[in-house]
Image (cartoon, grey):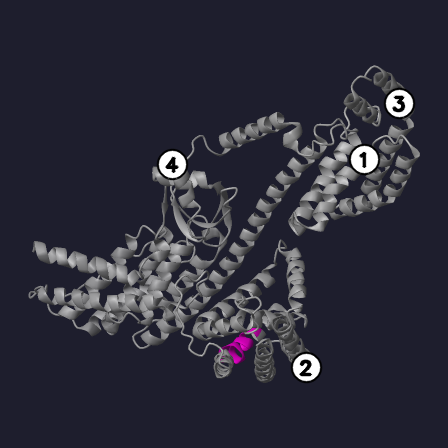
Amino acid sequence: MINDSRQTLIDCHSRLREFCQSQLSILINAASEYLFQQAEQANDNETQQRYFDVQKMIEAEQKTLTTQFERTLSALFAVLITPSAQTQANKKRIDSSDNILSLLDNDEMELKVALSSMSHRAEADYAEALFALGQRLALLNNGIKLTAENNPFAPQVLCNNFMACIDKLSLDLQSRLILLKLFDRYFIKHLANIYAEINLHLVNRNVLPNLRYHHRTDRAIAPKRRKSDNAAIKDSENRQSELFEVMRSILNAQPAANNHHQPSISVERLIAELSAIQSQQLIRFTSASITAEPAPALKNTNANTSQQQAIECVGILFEHILNDDGLHDSVKSLLSHLHTPLLKLALLDKTFLSNPKHDARQLVNKLITAGENWITDDTSAENNIYQHMQSVVKKIITDFDNDNSNQIFSHVATEFNTYIEKIERQASITEKRSIQVVKGKEALESGREKVTTLINEKLCDEALPKPILQLIKNPWSAFLAYTLLRHGDESTQWIEAVNFIDELLWYIEPKINNEEKNQANNLRSVINEKLKYGLSCVGLDANEIQQHLSSLEMCSQLATENIYDVQKSADTVEKKSNENSSQNTEQSILKNRPPNVTESHLQNPQSSSLEASHPKNVTQEKNETTIEKTFISATERASENAIANVLSMDFGTWLNWQKSDEPLRRLKLTWYNQKTQNCMLSNSMGQQVAIVSANEIALGMSKGSITVSDTHLQKPFFERMLETVVDRLRLKAQTA
């Protein structure tokens, strides 16, 4: 059975290797052609040369890249095929965790976001095939399921593998993003073929031939989808169409509001009048100060029923915009300038009001969403979204005429959508970096507290020479925190760093015989080397390190040189205490200390923990710290259930934060620490705004000053507007 499983896995490896060789060859040829085209179209010589250089490098390193890609996959298969390789793989994973706290720069973060998005999309697209493949490989792997990190067929593994390969080429960010895009197109998009082939091969080998796929709804990480792919958007479009039909039926049932004493106006005349008003808008539309534009004042609105309905609907649309509490006043003023162009569009194109997919409607939805999400008092000065919205509105006012409605709105909507996607990417990168920083600070603070407690346990309030006390509590304490964060509290490095304190304390004790002196001499070089390494890790220079070494040696020598005076005093004490042997032992140890030390750390060797030696002092210190922190953070405490509810919120939950005498702020609960109960709040740009306690949020929610915002869960603006219109028309019809 084992041999059959091994052979089956070898066959799977062979098929995957053939697939990778084929697709990578296609990819590199496509990349070479694409880079050549980009070079031909470059606007300057420098850019052109860069594309040519990348093209040559890709072609020259094709074999190396392919070999490295296959080698990584072979290593993963080796773990499956050869059980003895499992230990080495685990060791590599442990070693690779050393850099877990390192911050990524902007380029690396952007690449990481692109990789994550690509792999998550692939996981969603091939969910059924991956599920079947994972179950069958687990059976061949003695029932042990593979993860996204060690499954050689997983999109995450393949994406990270390719990224590692091109990283060795030392390319610039733009070139790497191009190669990732091509990898997605020519490799990831074709994974369905290899998944189908491998699953079929395993079925033919009688590996779970009757397996059925069960869709999981509890995915830990839901793949991000484009809105056009989202079923909720389709439901919204259907809902908008239904609402429009209801609105039109209600309006048709109402008597016409035509003025028979005034001549009827043609649609052409209305459009000409609106075009004249639109031309005059440019004079009032200046980037320096944009004020609200009133509704177009038409001289004669005695039009037919459909035209009057269009005028009324567009009027209600902008009334809804001006009454939207989620929009900044500057956005309302800016969007009011679209009233005239959109009214003209509604008269020119009847599908504007009836078709939810109309480009102009999509643009309005995008502008409203951008205004709600990105234009706030916190972020307006830190991004140029408002300026970009200005250019959109100005372009429509300037370029929209009677013949190009479809082209102008489609073009502007596409450009604005691309721009917002870029901003969202940047915000995601900023947010992830902010979370990294906060996590690092939390871990550092926790590590420092643990180190402080440990040092207090080791010293037990012993009166040590001042240079030694400063050495342990300052630079060596920092090195302990560094070691704890980098390697963890179960690592050899941490244990050695902790034990060094005991070695140091013994080293400065007086040496009363030749054996102890020899031990100290043998230990001297070891202590010096450890001390040099530790102090250099926390940034001390050579002079500072030498000062600590000299102080240490001086304390050790003084303690031993003065031992004879202490010995004489100790012998006198010993003669007076002969009746108690335990006291004799204690006094014999007491003689082994420097003159300025009143109590030896070796006095009570059984007191290895702080609780055993000073339980009262520690408890008192802990209570004082707790009380101090309580008064700093809050004067009252929310219920445990309320705090637990805050700490169970999803990351990314938006909160409306309304403090007294301050404007409403919308902040995102980006991250929290279950242990410390500290919560990170950020703005829409992903920037950290504050670190607050879960208790403060819970208290605010109980008092109503903090509420969960549904802004990011709202329906598209046109759907909300149509619902308002229909409700208003129904009420009007009932009271008529």
Residue 116 shown left or right of residue 83 in the figure: left
Dot 4 amino acid type: Ser
The main secondary structure of the magenta stretch is helix
Which badge, 3 or 1, is on the more N-terminal residue? 1
Mark 3, other Cα within 10 Å: few <14 / some 14–19 / many ≥20: some
Amino acid identity at mark 2 = Lys
Q: Which of marks 2 and 1 is nearer the N terminus?
A: 2
Q: How far apart are marks 1 and 4 (CA)?
A: 60 Å
Crowdedness near tag 2: few (<14), some (14–19) or many (≥20) residues, C-alpha within 10 Å: some
Q: Is residue 496 above or below residue 96?
A: above
Quadrant of the drawing holding the C terminus = bottom left
The reply to whether discs 2 and 4 touch (Cβ–Cβ < 8 Å) is no
Segment colored magenta: 180-190
The residue sitting at 48% across, 54% down in the picture is 685
- Amino acid at dot 3: Gln
Mark drawn on residue 506: 1
Tell me where residue 288 sits by quadrant: bottom left
- Give me the residue at 71% from left, 50% from top: 492
- The residue labelled by disc 3 is 567
Q: Is residue 348 left or right of residue 365?
A: left
Q: Name the residue under label 2.
A: 63
Secondary element at image label 1: helix
Foreground: disc 1 or disc 4:
1
